[in-house]
Amino acid sequence: MSLPVKGYEPNIKSYLQPEYRLEIRDDTCIRCGVCTRQCTYGVLSLDEEADRIVADHVKCVNCNRCVLFCPTNSIIVTRPPLSHRDNANWTPGDIYTLCKQAETGGVMLTGMGNPRDFPIYWDKLLLNASQVTNPSIDPLREPMELRTYLGRKPDFVKFDPETCDVSGEMGPHLRLETPIMFSAMSYGSVSLHIHHALAMATKRFGTFWNTGEGGLHPTLYKYGANTIVQCASGRFGVHSDYLNAGAAVEIKIGQGAKPGIGGHLPGEKVSLDVSQTRMIPEGTDALSPAPHHDIYSIEDLSQLVHAIKEATDWKKPVAVKIAAVHNSAAIASGIVRAGADIVALDGLRGATGAAPTIIRDNVGIPIELATAAVDARLREEGIRNRASVVIAGGIRNSADIIKAIALGADAIYCATPALVAMGCQVCQRCYTGKCPWGITTTDPYIMKRINPYIAAERVHNLLKAWSMEMKEMLGGMGVNSIESLRGNRLHLRGVGLNSEELRILGVKHAGD
Amino acid sequence: MTASSKVGKGDKAKPVEIDAAELLYQDLNHKVKLAAWEQGAQHIILRNVCGQRYIGTGVDRNISIDVHGTPGNDLAAFGNGPRITVFGNAQDGCGNTMNEGSVVVHGHAGDIAGYAMRGGSIFVRDDVGYRVGIHMKEYMDKIPKLVIGGTAQDFLGEYMAGGIILVLGLTPEEGALQKADHIATGMHGGTIYIRGKVDPHQLGIDVEQLEMEQCDIRTVETLVESYVSFFKEDASKGKPLDASDILSGKFIKLRPLSKRPYAKIYAY
């Protein structure tokens, strides 16, 4: 017997078990149908004959949209009871993936950041606080500085004691009122309303958001002063006006969720508006090649950095973003020497709108280790001043930010917290384009679920809350400026870390 | 910094000449920008160019720039308006991510000419290097055109998403095989026309070879006529260029099989 010929598509019965199970309380359900309209995956429907809501469990992604919108709280999402025999090696997830691949022959896709049980070093680092000597500071009563400047700092400064003037060769800088920026999320992977919300929130707070590689919608040019525009290998929507519209330009080499591979925006998501912004025809796959084909070396990177500087008349800082991988420190050194003003590092936990699961879950290194290694390397080489370091991938709260800055980062990028602030439940199905929360979709019907003004308010609130918390932590340490914390690892102690981890992080163990 | 423009402010009619000898690229490009922006020059002539990069980048005006010598990499990168003529060879990355304008090279061009270009045109009299026209794209009325008089190396039109590439094959012996392998690998938009012989094994798997239709012939005719008008006076050619001679050759047309090449590789 031979294998079927190419093109023969047998009707394969699906062995996929539902991952989730919906329980609908019939006694409290009022049959209003809200859940059936809110679900974008077609899980719920009203069976009019039986007069009850029925669920197609296998389609449920556990996004909680129906749960939170049911007016009588009649829906809960649970796990199917004991789907497989207990097995520490073969988890239900492994079996599910295998079945799906056997049925489709496709690469498994996913969204958001790496969910696996790798060490989270943030949780193994503890902060210091002042006691008795160097008294702590109350940020509610005393000035506390979070302002951060990103860009190249001069090798030397001259101080004139007569006039008290400080002079040195200063390049263009970004001025942040808090060391928090929002990472690149392209228009197409997220809806235009998300871009609007991020732009409004960052403008109001005095920080920056990043366009991602999908261009900048014409209605967003007015937020240029708070926008970092990205130039990735696909060069979508990249032209002179775009490069000059932003406050800085970021060259995207890699992304923490998918180091080494490019982005693919599927044709279904390339709607009319997305096509106008990316400047490609509607409905075509938007493929970003894995490398930039004009960059095969550090010298070539330098060439693109300077091409962008020429195109922007040397008025904008240029950032280079890489995924944190094994040799990040050496690569970062090359990036700085190539002339970048900002190095952006995106770690193992960095999220994505779509990436092959196998890549997201297995490639890269934790950002905490990469941050410490890059900062140490740049200091050793005496070039730390030439570029700012912005880290991303796995920032969950303001303490993570404080720890990142103590490990040597100048500022952080985060994206998942902003999306969660807007409603995201981290269900990891961004790649479907059907986000029931209206975030990672370009469907005009679904994207209306995000009101950009309310979303901006929520994101602004997050910035405000985190900034206040950071001031409290700084005050507790007895420092009144984020500058005093930068790279100051004496404010950190490790718990439960081995000596190798402590060496790389450059911190002492608690008690030491 | 010895070079200076030879005309006074406001004299738009006369070309502005800039001596590029011993100028760093940043200084040279600064002079070009000043001439274009502040003097309002419509025509700038650069002499003694020797490897300076990014000529025409960031100028963003619809002016002509003549380059005498050898411009460096990324000529007209992010180009948005200037019409650049090179009397010499262009190096790598010419027309990188170009949006508008043109580059006419009286000689050869290096690798990745026309990378990700979205608009405008590039005419190269002779041969080009590897991965030329990679990821060219088009958008509405912006349909970039890349015309190569000689031959191209491997991966011509890789990832091509739009626009037109025309290879005239004038440099090899008549009837000889085109040099490039892996032509149009990953192509998902646009059209490639090649005059001369191409073996099927030289093509990527994502394309099909089609017969020339009437509209293709018209497109090729227009481009060939422009090519001839640009280069007919070049003395380096043995016999004068003639459009009808060129057009009498056999052309092949390559189109992508799908504009969704990755639609089926994922499990949704």
Image: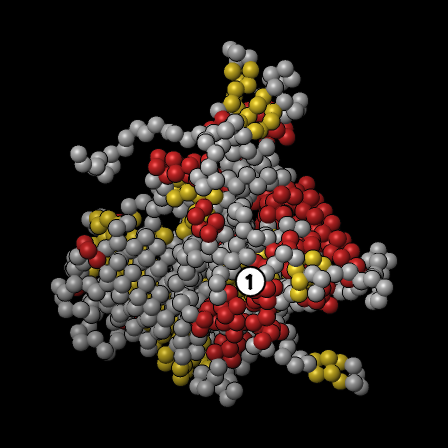
Q: Tell me residue A501's x, y (percent).
A: 58, 62
Q: Quadrant of residue B234?
A: bottom left
SS of the residue under disc 1: helix
Left/right of residue A314 with respect to residue B80 in the rendered view: right
Crowdedness near tag 1: few (<14), some (14–19) or many (≥20) residues, C-alpha within 10 Å = many
Residue at point 51%, 11% (across, down): A49
Quick one: A440 or A224, which is closer to the camera?
A: A440
Quick one: B152 or B185, which is closer to the camera?
A: B185
Residue at point 41%, 51% (across, down): A287
Residue reaching furthest to the left: B175
Residue at point 45%, 31% (across, down): A84
Give the vertical position of A83 relative to A215 (above or below).
above
Q: Tell me residue B42's x, y (percent).
A: 47, 72
Quarter of the figure that contains the C terminus of chain A: bottom right
The three-letter code of the residue at mark 1 reads Ala
Give the vertical position of A189 relative to B1 (above or below).
above
Q: Which residue is mark 1?
A: A370
Q: Tell me residue A384's x, y (percent).
A: 60, 73
Q: Quadrant of residue B260?
A: top left
